[in-house]
Image (cartoon, rainbow, N blue to C red):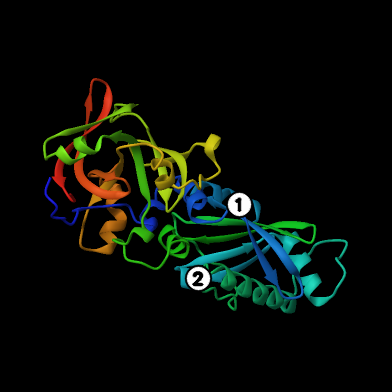
Amino acid sequence: MNSTEKTSVLRREPVVAFIRRPGAASALARVLLPEETRLDLPVLGSAALRFVGLDHEALVRILDEMRGAGESFPLPALGPGLLLVDPLLARHLTSRVLGLPMPPIVVALSRIERGVLGGLLAGAWGKLGLGGIDVAQAGATRLAADAVALEVSVDWAGETGRVWLCAAPASLGHCWAPPASSADAASAVRLELARTRLTTSDAQATAEGDVVVFEETSALSSSSSWSVLLRHGERCTKVSLDPKGCVRADDRTAVADRASPKRQAATSPGVEVTAELAHRAVGAATAAEAAFVLRPRGDGILLRADGRDWVEGSLCESDGRLAVRITRALAG
């Protein structure tokens, strides 16, 4: 291989595209959001927050359960969005801020109490950096047909409750992801199929047309679900992608792994190679976000060598093992 570096024509999937996949919200929350964070609130003190992503079907169930109960705030900036608070938590928070005892029966908040709750929530979301939230409006909000949600469990002064941030997948995805272009690695997820190790001499000798075999991974069937490691930065979780692109999280590995791939690789000689699903680059951002609809499991494979994009390729198999045929070299 020569030392000339080329720009890849393949791109990793943007966060705002991945979250649109059915079932993806839960897995995405595991790798993008902390398992728990603490937030200091005026008057109320410290609260522990835990995050869970909910897909559209789960959100529909929540909305049915909460119909006529709780407090909701339209979020037009999220095109449109909804902030929903369970009724018991809403009452606990406002009573504490106003210095009132908890009533024996939980009833809907008054206009003044609702304003107090809205101001408290706006300040809390602002501290979390989850995007601007306008809680001044009132009235019902009609969510997008494919809306998803971020569920926040709140543990404060012995009281627990839940809050839901509901919006269209793209809007919520922009809240979760750093503000960057779709070509920026920070705004994309990595969908890793397999990894193996090559000797340095073998890696240096590869050329277009050669096949890299992943001996530890069985060949993939186009009609079956594929096991994929969803990565963002140093966090990862196992999911499966079915032929239509739907995501199912592996609950046995629900806790995101924070181990650094670079530290793990450093203990073995040679070059660590990973195979990742990727999509062919397109000009428009909207097309990039919708690319997985056309090819749910990508247009090609990006091979990384020791954490660096190395070659492009296409999936194949070798004696029942997963393999990638190199179509284009990127780096020496």
x then y, percent, for residue 220 = 30, 29
Q: Which mark is residue 181?
A: none
Of helix, strand and loop, which one carries label 1?
helix
Q: Which residue is located at x 38 percent, y 60 percent?
A: 186
Q: Is residue 280 visible?
A: yes
User: Total label count?
Assistant: 2
Q: In the displayed structure, does residue 104 sit left or right of residue 327?
A: right
In the image, taking residue 26 as reference, residue 229 lies left or right, namely: left
210 vs 61, nearest the viewer: 210
**Mark 1: amino acid:** Ile
According to the picture, the residue beneath numbered tag 1 turns out to be 62
Crowding at label 1, few (<14), some or many (≥20) Cα neighbours within 10 Å?
A: some
Q: Is 175 placed above or below 201 here? A: below
Q: Nearer the viewer, mark 1 or mark 2?
A: 2
On the image, the x and y values in percent for residue 157 come to: 79, 61
Quadrant assignment, res 224: top left
Q: Nearer the viewer, residue 279 or 121?
A: 279
Residue 33 vertical placement versus 191 (above, below) = below
For image coordinates 38% across by 58% down, the residue present is 16
Give the residue drawn at x 14%, y 52%. 3
Left/right placement of residue 293 relative to residue 103 reads left
The label shown at residue 131 is 2
Q: Quadrant of the N terminus?
A: top left
Give the spatial CA distance, label 1 vs label 2.
Answer: 23 Å
On the image, the x and y values in percent for residue 283 come to 20, 62
Quadrant in which residue 117 is drawn:
bottom right
The amino acid type, in three-letter code, at marker 2 is Gly
For disc 2, the neighbor class at 10 Å (few under 14, some 14 to 19, many from 20) is some
User: What is the secondary structure assignment of the residue under circle 2?
Assistant: loop
83 or 265: nearer the viewer: 265
User: Do labels 1 and 2 touch, CB within 8 Å?
Assistant: no
First in sequence: mark 1 vs mark 2: 1
